[in-house]
Amino acid sequence: MNVSIKTLMFASLTAASAVHADTTQTQPLVRATVSTDSAMVAAANPLAVKAGVDVLAKGGTAADAAVAVQMMLNLVEPQSSGIGGGAFMLYWDAQAKKLLTFDGREKAPASATPEYFYGDDGKPMKWWDGVVGGRSVGVPGTLKLVEHVHAKYGNQKWMSLLIPAIVKAQIGFEVSPRLHKSIAAAQERKLDLFESTRNYFFNEDGSPVAQGSYLKNPEFAQALREIGINGSAPFYTGRIAEDIVAAVATETNPGEMTLEDLANYSVIERAPVCVPYRAHEVCGMGPPTSGGLTMAQILTMLNNHDLPSMGPTAEAWHLYIEAAKLAYADRGLYMADADFVDMPEGLLDKTYLAQRAALIDLEQAMEKAEAGVPPKEDADRFSPDTQPERAGTSHFSIVDQFGNIVSMTTTIETGFGSRVMTNGFLLNNELTDFSFAAEREGLPVANRVEGGKRPRSSMSPTMVFKDGAPVLAIGSPGGSRIINYVTQKVIAILDWEMDLQAALDLPHVVNRNGATDLEENTAATDYQGALEALGHKVKTRGLNSGLHAIAIEDGKLFGAADSRREGIAAGF
Ligand code: GLY
């Protein structure tokens, strides 16, 4: 089958009034859920979706399509993800009827110590001071992740999956409104500090490349050609590895990554984190992301409340907010890379979570929640992590004609990562997802920096099952708000039976164990009075998710892309 971009069933996109405001929000759109019979991709950019759908149309698997989508995203949405970053993937193997989860998270260099982000004054740096430069760059995992999953589940030639991105990089791609706006916004955040980054994203007069202009990336095309011929070897042990090590040795904030760090990088297959939620099972990624566990805690605490009959009301949001506060409190204290930290075994213990849920007062909001003491856990082992996370991430969902499914969240951390660029791709600043403070009041922070450790993430690639069969793949960017975005859309789809597009576009109500954020200029602000009457501290602000989801119902596929960004869902 040969599918051209014109024959793809794109979501209907119509300009509408500005509903969502955010510095990098560019294209408020009214969309509709897309329905197809066989295969689908939902991702943050139409060119990436087309690259993936073309692979699926040739008989490729979801694993094949994920390679093509990721490489194209690297080119056309370079601020959010790419081979210079890390990712987590959930893969449903339809033949084996098995869910696998793959950890391609970045790692700290082997030499890193808990004081890695301490300044000359012996104190933890300010967060932004740690971001810019090679110091924040973790050993990237995304390329090895897609290569690993392709080797296991792909049926298309590796090189063929890179060709769409190579061609676009060579001939140029149209700079999207969002990319242009993101470059302009990041200029204030030192995006033009390093020469190679400045030369790529800015004109000679220092202005950001214009929206609608064609941007060529021959260096990236060359890197992908070498990776297409030799696999990930040039990146982890060859020419590109040498360039990465040289690039992170920036004058300001130099990194410590070595060739050995790159050569030693490995993808880890981990056990999924699954919990029952009413008639469904919700599955996510385990540590080093906090996403799966925190979502699972929130949903388990809400399982005994009748959210389905409440609908999206202040009453339901009160319960959601309180459960989120309790879960984020545990996240802050305990969750980190479980290969380095003995995390409590009982975080999903039903009795423990029932005790936690009993702390929710139906009439009164709690102040900041304290972390609980799960079974077999010694209290006072850790001190909480208060590290911020910025929203420079992307999520895509894919279903192939064989029923295999990918739910992958992929990141270079904040928009444009460390600002350090080599071979046409940006290097991540993922190490700033570690706690800069190693300890507080004599107790270690679980998510402190350690050599070879993976920083705690909030990424929450998710799949939902009914009677053992997959019914939904979903995820989002959004820093530590990701967990809120994904959890409440799962509730909207399962409990409130909302149409998929309507669920993604449902205005956000977010709590990370502090004030409640209501999405500004949306109907979420209507809850402000009722929530304040219950004692909630409420703020309104832009909340820029990027949810991309595919639902499976009665043999048909339904896809949707977050109206807050410029992605689409399409297939055949
Ligand atoms: N850096 C975003 C995350 O991993 O959650």
Image (tube, helix red, strand yellow):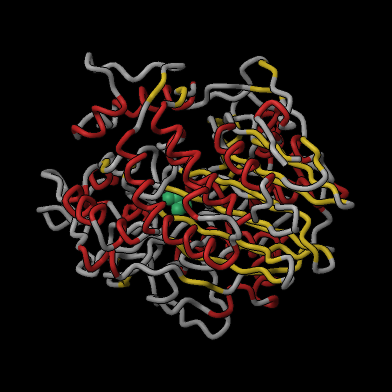
Whether residue 95 is situated above or below residue 505 in the rendered picture: below
| Front residue (pair 139, 168) | 168
Whether residue 388 is situated above or below residue 526 in the rendered picture: below
Instruction: Tell me if I can see residue 330 in this picture.
Output: no
Instruction: Tell me if I can see residue 563 in this picture.
Output: yes
Q: Residue at x 51, y 78 (%)?
A: 344
Query: Left or right: where does residue 91 sit relative to residue 316?
Result: left
Q: Residue at x 34, y 63 (%)?
A: 107
Q: Residue at x 25, y 56 (%)?
A: 241
Q: Position of residue 373 (x, y in %)?
A: 53, 75
Q: Position of residue 355 (x, y in %)?
A: 67, 72
- All told, the count of numbered labels is 0
Residue farthest to the bottom, as pictured = 376
* Quarter residue 190 falls in: top left
Quarter of the image for the N terminus: give it: top right
Quarter of the image for the C terminus: give it: top right
Q: Residue at x 23, y 52 (%)?
A: 244
* Quarter residue 502 falls in: top right
| Front residue (pair 188, 327) | 188
| Front residue (pair 520, 20) | 20
Q: Position of residue 15 (x, y in %)?
A: 66, 16
Query: Left or right: where does residue 278 sit relative to residue 118?
Result: right
Q: Position of residue 521 (x, y in %)?
A: 62, 23
Whether residue 190 is situated above or below residue 359 in the rendered picture: above
| Front residue (pair 238, 183) | 238
